[in-house]
Amino acid sequence: MKKRKIFILIERRADYSRYKPIMQLLKQDPAFELYLVVTGICLLDIHGKDVNYIENDGFYINAKIPMFAPGAEDTGGEMVRSFARVTLGVVDELEKANPDIVLSGFDIGGNMAVTIAAAHMNIPVAHIQGGEVTGSIDESIRHAMSKFSHIHFPATELSKQRLIRMGEDPSSIYVVGCPSIDVLVNTPYLDKSEIEKRLVIDLSIPTLLMIQHPVTTEHLDSYAQIQETVAAIKESGVQCIVLLPNNDAGHAKIIEYIKQNDLKWFPSLPTDVFINLYRNVSALIGNSSSGIHETPTLKIPAINIGTRQQGRERAENVIDVPNKKEEIVKAVKKALFDKEFRAMVSAIENPYGSGDSAKKIVDILRTVRLDGIVQKIFHD
């Protein structure tokens, strides 16, 4: 049987964490050829230049597409310009690659660009984690990508039903879970002492991992919002490790304020270090989708701040709070020191799967019918 060429574009560390287990299976399967493009903040030093981690993990990168202009303003308008740049670049790469399937995902600009481009070029698109609901511009991007896609890999049954209500063909929808959980489950364990030594931290004391991104629909409030979070962490008096945010509109003020304060921060971390740090912290704080998707597997609380994840299906370990210091402090105390709550969290199940998503996706990509699927029909 002819190999199926799968085109994947990676823009941020968050989508790499989801694509990595899928790419590992594609790479070792003779039924596939992988065409990999890297763009976005993965190419930027200030955000940790994750392209180096991707290459160190053994993946061949077919192309790198600069997406963000040096010194560009931190605005919604610049987000649109970056979207235009990457769209032009992916068209050229799609023409070179001539893939059988574009595997797109989630709710970010670079993946939206390749989804729209491929659909216009009559290339079948398979979309990971459509049908979820959140705040910010991500909500609109995700649903738009679903309408441009032909094969759907939602994480949950609830997301599948939402896609059906959007008019997508039920026979094209496969519930597979969230592939980032595969990384949590399968990353080799490192001794806690090794993580402590590499990051110069003491994981024997209560520790928060903070990932707080800007909310594009509230980007003018980003500075005030990060001030509330940092003030709450300081008042709580707990150790906190910070990963810098993505570069959506409003990110510059967040990064500036984090660097001004007495917090240990990293622009990014290698996957094995990040996962093993994650396994040893007491709770996640911020507004990352990781708090919703991944913390239930780790059996730790997630303090979800603000509106970025509003409406997203979640387990009972998530504590939702507004961007107010007093409420965040209360949530930190509950997450770290409420024994009854932490006992409940230790017994929850993750609605986003158990760590076998990549295999499910690759098995479907191997055999799914491609003829005629780019001509979509709305299903009532």
Image (cartoon, rainbow, N blue to C red):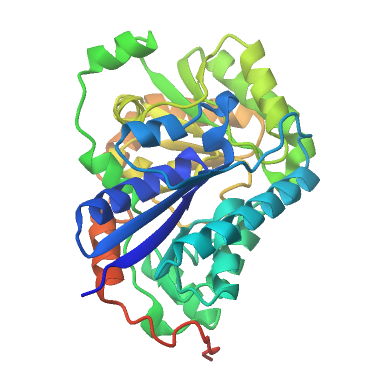
Vertical position of residue 177 compared to residue 14: above or below: below
Q: Is residue 364 above or below residue 179?
A: below
Name the residue at 55% across, 39% down.
287
Nearer to us in this view, 56 or 142: 56
For the image, the number of numbered tags is: 0
- Percent of width and height locating residue 311: 55, 57
Q: In which quadrant is the N terminus drawn?
A: bottom left
The residue nearer to you, when weighing 127 against 336, is 127
Where residue 204 sits: x, y (%)? 29, 12
Give percent across and percent down for residue 63.
Answer: 49, 46
Up the image or down, 372 lies above or below 19; here it is: below
**255 sits left or right of 291 in the view:** right
Q: Quadrant of residue 345?
A: top left
Q: Could you say which quadrant of the image residue 142 lies in? A: bottom right
In front here: 328 or 276?
276
Q: Residue furthest front?
A: 96
Residue 43 on image: x %, y %: 54, 34
Residue at 64% over, 57% down: 87
Describe residue 241's horizontal placement relative to residue 138 as left or right: left
Vertical relation: 276 (above or below) 40: above
Q: Is residue 174 visible?
A: yes
Query: Residue drawn 73% across and 28% down?
Result: 223
